[in-house]
C-alpha cells in the first residue's frame, strides 16, 4: 500500500476585511509531487470557487508558478486566486514582505502584482489583455435571467474575455441584479451553438461603480462571490458604454456576492485614458485557517 503524503494548505477570504465574507480560496504553498488529476480531485473535494497550487516558476520574471482549479476544471487565469495566492506568498515569506511588485506565472502568462502598503495592504493585479467578442439579444438575456427586458439597460450585452470568456449584461437597478438567476440550461440557451465555456455577469451601475453577480455553472460554480478576472473587462465595458469615466486614474468599486451572503469589494483603477495603460483590480485579503491534507 502506498505511503500517504501530507500537504499543508491555507484558506483565505479574498476581497474582504471580514472573515466568512468575500471569496474563499484554498492555497497549497508547496504542491511538489501533486499530479494534475489529483489537483483537480482536491479542488472538487474542497468545493470552493477555486483552489491554487504553488510550484517554482519556470520563467525568470516570475516568483512562483500558480495552477488554478475550480471544482470542475483548470483555469488559465482567475482574479481572486491571483490576489489570494499573492497574499499567502507574502505571509509565508516566499516573497519578501517589503516587495511591492512581482509577477506570478499562470497559464495565461506572467501576471503583474502590485502591493499597496498600509496597515492592511491592498493587493492589485494587472488585468491581462481584454478581448471583445459577439453581442447578444437583450430579450433573450432577460428571458434566461428571469427578468423583464425593461429591467435591462439600453445597451447590448456582449462577450468580453481577459482569459475567462464572460457575457456582460447590464440592468437598471440593484434589485434586478438580486432577482436574476441563471442555470446551466439557461446559459446554454444564451450561448447557442458556442461550445467554449462561459460565465455570465450581471451588473447595475451605482454611485460607487457597480453592483454585480456572476454565474458560472459550466465551471462547477453556481454563483461566484467575487470574480476578479471579469472585473477588468467589466470596467472596460462600462467605459465603452459611457457608464463610468475613462479618465486616467479613475477608481471605483464593484460590490459582488452580497445576495449570496459573501459581500465582496473589488477595487478598480484605470491606468491611462480609457485603460490604455491597463486596468488594475485589487482588494484586501483576510486569513482564515490552516490545515493539512493527507492522501
Image (cartoon, grey):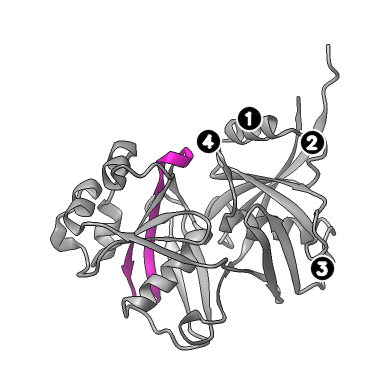
Residue at the (31%, 46%) spot, across then down: 191
Name which of mark 1 and mark 3 comes first in the sequence.
1
User: Where does the magenta region start and end?
Assistant: 203-220
Q: CA distance from mark 1 to mark 3?
A: 32 Å
**Tag 2 near tag 1, CB within 8 Å:** no
Q: Which mark is residue 97?
A: 3
**Dominant secondary structure of the residues highlighted in magenta in the image:** strand
Q: CA distance from mark 4 to mark 3?
A: 33 Å
Q: CA distance from mark 2 to mark 1?
A: 14 Å
Q: CA distance from mark 4 to mark 1?
A: 9 Å
Name which of mark 2 and mark 1 comes first in the sequence.
2
Name which of mark 4 and mark 1 comes first in the sequence.
1
Quadrant hosting residue 42: top right
Q: Quadrant of the N terminus?
A: top right
**Callout 2 secondary element:** strand
How packed mark 1 is, by other alpha carbons closer than 10 Å (few <14, some 14-19, many 20 or more), is some
Say which residue label 4 marks: 72
The answer to if 185 sits in the magenta stretch is no
How packed mark 4 is, by other alpha carbons closer than 10 Å (few <14, some 14-19, many 20 or more), is some
Rendering coords of residue 82 (x, y %): 64, 58
The reply to whether residue 29 is visible in this rendering is yes
Residue at the (47%, 37%) spot, across then down: 220
**In-image side of 293 versus 210 (left or right):** right
Say which residue label 1 marks: 41
**Callout 1 secondary element:** helix
Rendering coords of residue 295 (x, y %): 76, 24
Say which residue label 2 marks: 7
How packed mark 3 is, by other alpha carbons closer than 10 Å (few <14, some 14-19, many 20 or more), is some
Amino acid at each position: 500500500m502506498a505511503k500517504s503524503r501530507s500537504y499543508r494548505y491555507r484558506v483565505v477570504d479574498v476581497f474582504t476585511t471580514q472573515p466568512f465574507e468575500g471569496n474563499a480560496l484554498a492555497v497549497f504553498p508547496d504542491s511538489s509531487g501533486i499530479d494534475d488529476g489529483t489537483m483537480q480531485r482536491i479542488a472538487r473535494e474542497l468545493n470552493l470557487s477555486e483552489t491554487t497550487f504553488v510550484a517554482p516558476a519556470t520563467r525568470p520574471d516570475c516568483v512562483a508558478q500558480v495552477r488554478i482549479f475550480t471544482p470542475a476544471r483548470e483555469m488559465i487565469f482567475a482574479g481572486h486566486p491571483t490576489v489570494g495566492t499573492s497574499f499567502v506568498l507574502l505571509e509565508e515569506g516566499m516573497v519578501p514582505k517589503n516587495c511591492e511588485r512581482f509577477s506570478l506565472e499562470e497559464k495565461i502568462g506572467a501576471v503583474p502584482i502590485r502591493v499597496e502598503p498600509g496597515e492592511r495592504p491592498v493587493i492589485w493585479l494587472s488585468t491581462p489583455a481584454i478581448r471583445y467578442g459577439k453581442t447578444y439579444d437583450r430579450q433573450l438575456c432577460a428571458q434566461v435571467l428571469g427578468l423583464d427586458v425593461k429591467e435591462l439597460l439600453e445597451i447590448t450585452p456582449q462577450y468580453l474575455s481577459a482569459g475567462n470568456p464572460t457575457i456582460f449584461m447590464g440592468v437598471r437597478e440593484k434589485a434586478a441584479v438580486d432577482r436574476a438567476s441563471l442555470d446551466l440550461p439557461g446559459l446554454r440557451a444564451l450561448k447557442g451553438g458556442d461550445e467554449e465555456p462561459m460565465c455570465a455577469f450581471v451588473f447595475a451601475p451605482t454611485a460607487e461603480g457597480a453592483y454585480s453577480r456572476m454565474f458560472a455553472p459550466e465551471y462547477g460554480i453556481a454563483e461566484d462571490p467575487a470574480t476578479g478576472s471579469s472585473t477588468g473587462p467589466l470596467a472596460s465595458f462600462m467605459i465603452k458604454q459611457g457608464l463610468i469615466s475613462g479618465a486616467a486614474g479613475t477608481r471605483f468599486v464593484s460590490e459582488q456576492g452580497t445576495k449570496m451572503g459573501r459581500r465582496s469589494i473589488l477595487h478598480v483603477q484605470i491606468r491611462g485614458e480609457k485603460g490604455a495603460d491597463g486596468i488594475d483590480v485589487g482588494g484586501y485579503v483576510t486569513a482564515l485557517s490552516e490545515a493539512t491534507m493527507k492522501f
